[in-house]
Image (cartoon, grey):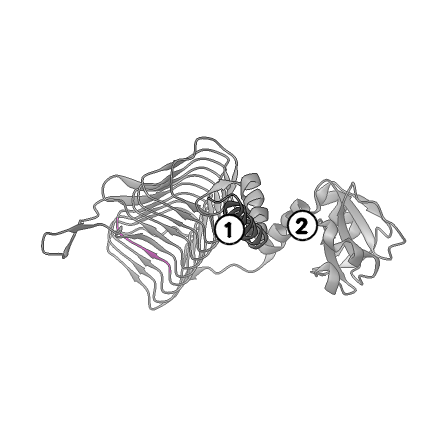
């Protein structure tokens, strides 16, 4: 499909600067822009590309100030990145969507499939499952006994959802994710062996959650492991048994929560962060990559390092670390001077 700058600007409530009849049919990165494509500029780091890009149309923030002439047509919007997201969503909605029931697939007796369901080949739906409208279940998905799934949910290939779990509306779960596997619960015995503690709870995922590929969310020992509304988990994350992840929290790849950890609302977790078990994290905290959180935090803020410290303190510590070799040399020299003084004083 082709769109003019005028039509795009009307959709985004933006302002055209240049040829309003410029036409685009696809997207490109600004540094790789080609004629007939739309690009965007939201990070000043890439601003120099806008003067040479061959993209026909570029989305820019209204605050952008050009330093020299630009051959592309500009569309000025409040937030170029958010506007691009809107366009991408519109484009995705225009793509053909899978539908119907492929064979072979298995649906247990008594399970009612909505008329607009998509069920891919080799999918398995167990007894007692309930499905909302407009659910898309891709090939090789397994859904266990008595699972409840809301409307407009997409389960990509290879997703496994264990028994009794609950998935809210408008959720997306990517390939290889496992929802509701047993929590890591083992009781040490006198003879050194470990006895498995039955995990009798479930996982509850609220509305508008997205879960990345190969992420695992363990069922609780009792009660529920809960992922609150609006949470976004990247690929390869781990949420242990009895944890709770607060509303609109985002977590980057390879981050992990130990058992019974509770994250507040609107928290940002960098890649490879680790949280010790049985602790709570205040709303609004931000954690840099590889941060280790092993004790309760008293207040919201930005943290980094292991153990986690306020980010300003962390950077001060890093400066001190760089100076350690010099400080060590100075300390050695001072010790020698003190020993010489002691000898001179006869001590």
Along the line of sight, the residue nearer the viewer: 184 or 131? 184
Q: Residue at x 76, y 65 (%)?
A: 34
Identify the residue at the far top of this view: 299
Identify the residue at the far left of this view: 191
Q: Residue at x 47, y 31 (%)?
A: 299
Q: Secondary structure at mark 2?
A: helix
- What range of the chain is rendered magenta? 159-163
Could you tell me residue 55's position as x and y percent? 78, 60
**Relative to residue 100, is residue 338 depicted above or below?**
above
**Which quadrant of the figure has residue 244?**
top left
Is 44 left, or right, of 330 in this rendering? right
> What residue does disc 1 label?
289
Could you tell me residue 313's position as x and y percent? 54, 40
Label 2 to label 1: alpha-carbon separation: 27 Å
Crowding around mark 1 (Cα neighbors within 10 Å: few <14, some 14 to 19, many 20+) is some
**Relative to residue 344, is residue 106 depicted above or below?**
below
Crowding around mark 2 (Cα neighbors within 10 Å: few <14, some 14 to 19, many 20+) is many
Q: Which quarter of the rendered picture does the N terminus lie within?
A: bottom right
**Which quadrant of the figure has residue 312?**
top right
Along the line of sight, the residue nearer the viewer: 190 or 65? 190
Q: Nearer the viewer, mark 2 or mark 1?
A: 1
> What residue does disc 2 label?
84
* Sequence-first disc among 2 and 1: 2
């Amino acid at each position: 499909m082709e769109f003019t700058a005028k039509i795009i600007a009307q959709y985004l409530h933006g302002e055209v600067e240049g040829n309003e009849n410029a036409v685009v049919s696809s997207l490109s990165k600004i540094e790789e822009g080609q004629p007939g494509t739309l690009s965007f500029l939201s990070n000043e780091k890439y601003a120099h590309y806008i003067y040479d890009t061959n993209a026909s149309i570029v989305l820019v923030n209204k605050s952008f100030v050009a330093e020299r002439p630009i051959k592309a047509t500009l569309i000025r919007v409040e937030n170029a990145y958010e506007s691009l997201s809107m366009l991408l969503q519109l484009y995705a909605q225009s793509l053909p969507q899978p539908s119907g029931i492929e064979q072979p697939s298995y649906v247990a007796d008594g399970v009612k499939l909505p008329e607009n369901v998509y069920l891919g080949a080799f999918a398995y739906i167990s007894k007692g499952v309930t499905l909302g409208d407009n659910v898309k279940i891709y090939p090789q998905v397994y859904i266990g006994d008595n699972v409840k799934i809301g409307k407009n949910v997409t389960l990509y290939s290879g997703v496994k959802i264990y028994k009794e779990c609950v998935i809210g509306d408008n959720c997306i779960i990517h390939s290889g994710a496992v929802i509701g596997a047993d929590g890591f619960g083992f009781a040490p015995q006198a003879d050194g062996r470990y006895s498995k503690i039955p995990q009798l709870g479930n996982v509850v995922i609220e509305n508008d959650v997205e879960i990345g590929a190969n992420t695992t969310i363990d069922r609780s020992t009792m009660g529920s492991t809960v992922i609150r509304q609006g949470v976004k988990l990247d690929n390869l994350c781990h949420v242990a048994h009895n944890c709770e992840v607060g509303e609109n929290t985002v977590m980057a790849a390879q981050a992990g929560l130990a058992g019974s950890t509770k994250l507040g609302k609107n928290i940002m977790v960098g890649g490879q962060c680790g949280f010790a078990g049985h602790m709570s994290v205040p709303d609004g905290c931000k954690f840099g990559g590889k941060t280790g959180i092993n004790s309760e935090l008293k207040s919201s803020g930005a943290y980094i390092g292991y153990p986690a410290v306020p980010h300003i303190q962390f950077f001060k510590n890093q400066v001190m670390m760089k100076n350690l070799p010099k400080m060590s040399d100075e300390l050695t020299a001072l010790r020698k001077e003190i020993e010489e003084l002691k000898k001179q004083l006869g001590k």
